[in-house]
Amino acid sequence: MKKFFEPDTVALIGASDKITRPGYHLFSNINAGFGDAFFPVNLKLGKIENKACYPTVLDVPSPIDLAVVFIPARSVPAALEQCAEKGIRRVIIESGGFAEAGPEGRILQDRCLDIARAAKMRLWGPNCMGLINVTQKKVLSFMRSHWRDNFIAGSVSLVVQSGMLSAGFLAYLLTDTPFGLSKIASIGNKIDVDESEVLEYLLSDPDTRVIALYLESLERGRRFFELSRSTDKHLIILKAGRTELGAKAAWSHTASLAQDDQILDAAFRHAGITRVYGFRELFEVARALGAARAKGSGGKRVAVLTFSGGAAVLASDTLADQGMELAQIGEAATNKLKSVFPTWMTPTNPVDLYPAIERSGHVQAMQQALEAVIEDPNVDAVYAHTIARLYSAGPDYRRIAEKARVYGKPLVVWSMGDAAGVAETRRNLEALGIPVVEEINRGVRVLAALTTGKVARIYGRPGSAGS
């Protein structure tokens, strides 16, 4: 897998000089990342933007680590035979029109696999968007070139069993709530390379701490779950095809047969994988886990700091769903909390901060409350609720983040209110290692993952209180 993600030389079979075509976007992206180590191939073109273009890969005057193929499906087998003759052992087929298109496409796909096996060649795809190594700024994908400048290197890697859906994922991630990414892999029909091989590479990748997956099927379930259980890295999965209708749609889309969902539920639970049920949820949980710097040691006692009784109830319900509990705040922490509360009120958990804010002001109340529960040995994790831009100043979150790290207390913030203020809160706090979520139940899911190290059960099943 390493030479798929980190090739030294790349050929593109199907390079285009038409700026509106995906073949041109592939050319532009690969050229930007590889320069003189990139060799475009097109039988009809001698040059693209003053870069030499070769009739076939056999004409390329250099060994090739990886070939990217983006030509009509019917022409792919012949291109693979040329790759085999050239000695190319890794090929990404981004073209569509294979098994997902029907029986004739299945025959083409099988032919490609036969050629590859005879040549000891590994195939990625087809019907995919390829892959992106964000940390090395290598884009082997037909995504629009101008998105490339928006990538932020980080610790979250994505594995997506789709082509255009991957592009949609990226458009959303890079324009709405950008966060640090490491690797992005679109694996399509999984003719050869599957999610388990990609997962094994990512588990050994020092730049990846969180792995988010969108899958329609699992090719080698036993291997996938063995790998999942073997790591402390966080895995989040959005599994499509969990109903009969969804399974039929998955087959028509990527020619993948969905598995029995109840069996998968049990396997996800046993492997400690966080299961989610929507795209936005997948990204939010992955982003939050990637941002977090404080990680717990297995305890499930949570302190909730809130402005609202209703929010306290919702958070408590979700804590119960996740097998967590409200911490019994100790005497020292209670006394510290009392110093900012009215004399007539003894604070309990969940801690309703509004009376303390009325008496002591927002900054002092929040600072004192956060420090009190983080320092409390009866508390394993902290869930703080905020309303963006309701107050002109806030606590010293840098100090709070450091305390959470030193005490080993995961801290998650749920922010609501002014939309621009929520985005600002997220940027500021996540830069300090404090995850920020926009939906109250997702914050508890993130806390569960951070507190136990690996999620111990399934979260947010449709129809449950945590969904």
Image: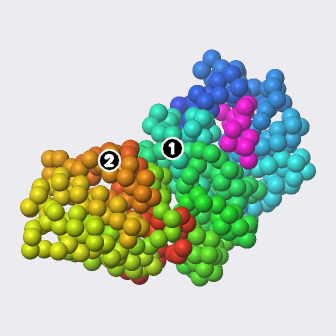
Visible residue check, residue 390:
no
Residue 140 sits in quarter = top right
Q: Residue at x 22, y 67 (%)?
A: 335
Question: 10 Å neighbourhood of mark 2: few (<14), some, or many (≥20)?
Answer: few
User: Going by the image, does 393 lie left or right of 287?
Assistant: left
Q: Magenta residues?
A: 1-15
Q: Residue at x 61, y 50 (%)?
A: 185
Q: Residue lying furthest front in this view? A: 332
181 inside magenta stretch? no
User: Going by the image, does 115 lie left or right of 67?
Assistant: right
Q: Nearest the camera: 126 or 212?
A: 212
Colouring: rainbow
- The amino acid sitting under disc 2 is Arg
Q: Provide residue 312's location: percent of width, then percent of height.
A: 26, 73
Q: Residue at x 76, y 50 (%)?
A: 123
Q: Which residue is under mark 1?
A: 154
Q: CA distance from mark 1 to mark 2?
A: 23 Å
Visible residue check, residue 212:
yes
Q: Residue at x 42, y 60 (%)?
A: 409
